[in-house]
């Protein structure tokens, strides 16, 4: 199961978080642990360089994309290889939504589209889709039309 997907800015502030199967009282621990993990390791990371960690029998894969850090946490069948695939799909979808590796401002401007992409990739703790063209097609935002 995918336990968490988090996006943070360079200061460690949470931009988007999705927890599944994590009790509410443990979420604060996970937030602070992941932000500290990123602060220690992502400072001089290259864009999209993957980092892997393990904590309490779960796997964590995280990376930096532009000014945004992305963390994916999984357990059981979602080992580091599967999480690497998940984070690859997430980073490519974010780049598609933003048109380039995002700054914090661009990420927040495209927040709705990024959340839609995330919903198509991960649903209720399970990997839903990795097909980039399918995700793009399902998350097309059309402006409202007058009837």
Image (spheres, helix red, strand yellow):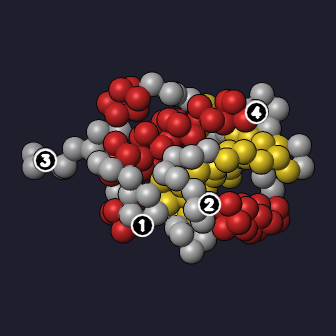
Packing grade of label 4 (10 A; few <14, some 14-19, many >=20) is some
Query: Taking 33 as reference, is 85 above or below it?
Result: above
Give the position of the N terminus as an image quadrant.
Answer: top right
- Tell me the residue at 22%/44% (across/down): 142
- Return the disc, 2 or 4, that comes first in the chain's sequence: 2
Query: Taking 11 as reference, is 87 above or below it?
Result: above
Mark whose residue sits in front, 1 or 3: 1
Alpha carbon separation for disc pair 1 and 4? 29 Å
| Residue 96 on image: x %, y % | 34, 42
| Residue 20 on image: x %, y % | 70, 47
- Return the disc, 1 or 4, that comes first in the chain's sequence: 4
Q: Which residue is mark 2?
A: 42
- Depth order, front residue of 128/74: 74
Alpha carbon separation for disc pair 2 and 1? 16 Å
Q: Which residue is mark 1?
A: 104
Place residue 131 in its image quadrant. Answer: top left
- Tell me the residue at 29%/48% (across/down): 99
Alpha carbon separation for disc pair 2 and 4? 21 Å
Packing grade of label 3 (10 A; few <14, some 14-19, many >=20) is few
Residue 79's label in the rendered image is 4
| Residue 102 on image: x %, y % | 38, 57
Residue 145's label in the rendered image is 3
- Depth order, front residue of 62/57: 62
């Amino acid at each position: 199961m995918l336990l968490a997907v988090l996006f943070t800015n360079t200061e460690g502030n949470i931009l988007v978080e999705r927890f599944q199967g994590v009790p509410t009282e443990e979420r604060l621990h996970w937030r602070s642990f992941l932000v500290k993990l990123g602060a220690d390791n992502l400072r001089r990371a290259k864009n999209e360089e993957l980092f892997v960690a393990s904590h309490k029998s779960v796997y964590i894969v995280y990376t930096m994309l532009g000014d945004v850090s992305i963390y994916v946490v999984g357990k059981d069948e979602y080992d580091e290889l599967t999480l690497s695939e998940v984070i690859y799909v997430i980073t490519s979808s974010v780049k598609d939504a933003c048109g380039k590796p995002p700054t914090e401002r661009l990420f927040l401007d495209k927040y709705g589209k990024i959340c839609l992409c995330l919903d198509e990739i991960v649903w209720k703790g399970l990997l839903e889709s990795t097909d980039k063209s399918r995700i793009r097609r399902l998350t097309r935002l059309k402006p409202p039309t007058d009837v």
